[in-house]
Amino acid sequence: MIIAQITDLHAGRHVETPAGTLDTFAALERAVDHLNALEPAPDIVVATGDLSHDTGPADYLRLKAALAELDMPLFVIPGNHDDRANLLAAFADDGYLPAGGGFLHYVVEGYPLRLIALDTTIPGAEAGELCAERLAWLEARLAEAPDQPTVVFMHHPPFETGIPFFDRIGCRGGAEMGEIVQRHPRIEAVLCGHVHRAIALRWHGTVVQVTPATGYQYPLQLLDAEGIAAVLEPPACRVCLWRPEVGLVSHLSYIDAR
Ligand SMILES: [Fe+2]
């Protein structure tokens, strides 16, 4: 089984960034073409939040139409930049997002890997959170199939990255999630976004991977500073190859590479 991950699309035609005005919608379209050209094709694609730059209903419908060009099933979760209700309205027809206005977390069954999608967002805030309700939901889902290899995906990394700018808008409840993860050794990986660059950590018996954005990247800014500038590092997606006898091998695939 192959899982591809894209993240932090921030899709828009005129997105102001410290690197200038970018057409991140075109970057998303290149990412879709890239994923469709991969051989062998991924079985599924997950998009781990910060999906649309503008967050009105029509913006999410345009995003949905661009992502509908993917040849494989897509599963999305919100990031801090997303509007949960408008995202849900656009993607509800796909059938996997819970209706009702609560957290957009869910389980994907029917593949060799079981996928658990977490919603770490707090409406109106840049930071994320796994509150007691969400932690209990995660623990209950893991308890349903403790022996099945599982991948968790979420927008905010559940650990401190060492980049102070992002750690200030990190994920509350990450330590408590770690205690749950420690009790479930079949979690093959936790896939995240939010930081717009590649990061990896051995964490509570699993591996956490942060994936670069499809739009624009942020620098390795380990010193504390007021803001953070975008950098023109290449966009990438993650391609995870699952073979039971080997495990989950995680590759970066650069989108504009020729
Ligand atoms: Fe984010």
Image (cartoon, grey):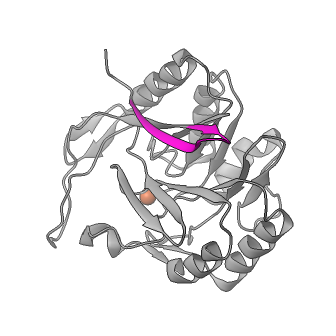
Observer-nearest of 238 and 223: 238
Quarter of the image with the N terminus is top right
Coordinates of residue 247 in the picture (x, y in percent): 59, 45
Q: Main secondary structure of the magenta part?
A: strand
Residue drawn where x is 43% and y is 72% of the image: 159
In the displayed structure, would residue 188 be above or below residue 174? above
Residue 103 quadrant: bottom right
In the displayed structure, would residue 156 be above or below residue 179? above
Coordinates of residue 111 in the picture (x, y in percent): 78, 40
Quarter of the image with the C terminus is top left
**Is residue 258 shown in magenta?**
no
Specify the segment rendered in magenta. Answer: 241-253
Residue drawn where x is 76% and y is 41% of the image: 112
Residue drawn where x is 68% and y is 61% of the image: 186
Coordinates of residue 10 in the picture (x, y in percent): 44, 44
Residue drawn where x is 59% and y is 77% of the image: 177
> Is 221 on the left-hand or right-hand side of 76?
left
Ligand 1 occupies quarter: bottom left
In the displayed structure, would residue 161 be above or below residue 78? below
> Is 169 on the left-hand or right-hand side of 1?
left
For the question of whether residue 12 can be seen, the reply is no
Residue 83 quadrant: bottom right
